[in-house]
Image: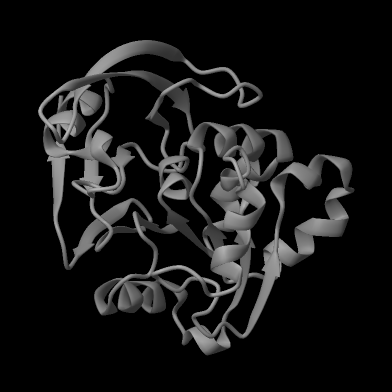
Amino acid sequence: MKLLLTSGGISNPSIYSALVKLLGKPIAESNALFIPTAIYPFRYGARFAWRPIGGQTKSPLCGLGWKSMGLLELTALPSLEKNVWLPAVQEADALLFWGGDPLYLSYWLQQSGLADLLPSLLSKLVYVGVSAGSMAASKVFAETYDNPRGGSGTPLTSEGIVFSTPQGGEVSRTLVTAKGAGLVDFALIPHFNHPDHPDASTANAEKWAAKLAVPVYAIDDQTAIKLVNGTFEVVSEGHWKLFIR
């Protein structure tokens, strides 16, 4: 299997080079499908889904110069015959999973039937994850919520957790643990120490990781994890930390 799990997308030359190596050919000769599904549970999710397509994100993803680009919407697949959408997936060189809500994405990976196909498909194509798109690739993952959204599947566990705030105070979150696609045996915490994601500060990430019975990589937006047939490598021009329970 070939995966490139990122926090912030193809954000620097090292991650770009890792993607090209996984593809085995230039991006200009590669076909990609973009999967925006994870972003829809958020307010204005439709606008956020357009941003990577329209080149309005900090790190390019759809706009890297692919030979061809298509849109694969997981919520639509159960209503379609498999022979309608599967050929496009089989002909792709990369599946680009956008960020958002990993619990929602994991649910639709299962409901669409794509999760069952990924282990065989990834011998040829590359799974490229951004944030939640990376988290959902794991056997098990956790995400924090103010109030967990409905309609996102059934979590394994849901519990309260107290995190520190940048101002030195405390805030209560709900930590939801759920099953992912099972492609990797570790979990990810994206946006490590990002000012806009205080739940992923070093102190909070340590509390978060302690709730998972698997190794947990906290990675910042300049870091990715590259995997080829079970062998993985951290590709980073930033900061990351491994938490082992």
Residue occupying image coordinates x 88% and y 47%: 80
Tell me: residue 164, above or below residue 114.
above
Q: Is residue 120 left or right of residue 16?
A: right
Between 215 and 158, the one lying in front of the other is 158
Q: Using the image as rendered, state which of residue 216 and residue 196 is in the foreground.
A: 196
Is the N terminus in the top left, top right, bottom left or bottom right quadrant? Answer: bottom left
* Residue 175 in which image quadrant: top left
Quick one: quadrant of the C terminus?
A: top left
Please indicate whether residue 17 sits to the left or right of residue 131 in the image: left
Residue sitting nearer the eye, 153 or 115: 153
Name the residue located 78 percent from the left edge and 64 percent from the top edge: 87
Residue at 40%, 49% in the rendered image: 131
Residue 112: x and y in percent read: 72, 40
- In depth, the one of 48 and 105 nearer the eye is 48
Residue 244: x %, y % from top left? 14, 31
Residue 156 position within the rendered picture, expressed as x and y whole percent measured from the top left = 47, 15
Furthest residue in direction front, as rendered: 167
Residue 207 appears left or right of 225: left
Examine the rendering and report whether any part of residue 27 can be seen.
yes
Q: Position of residue 126 (x, y in %)?
A: 50, 64
Q: Residue at x 40, y 29 (%)?
A: 140
Callout count: 0
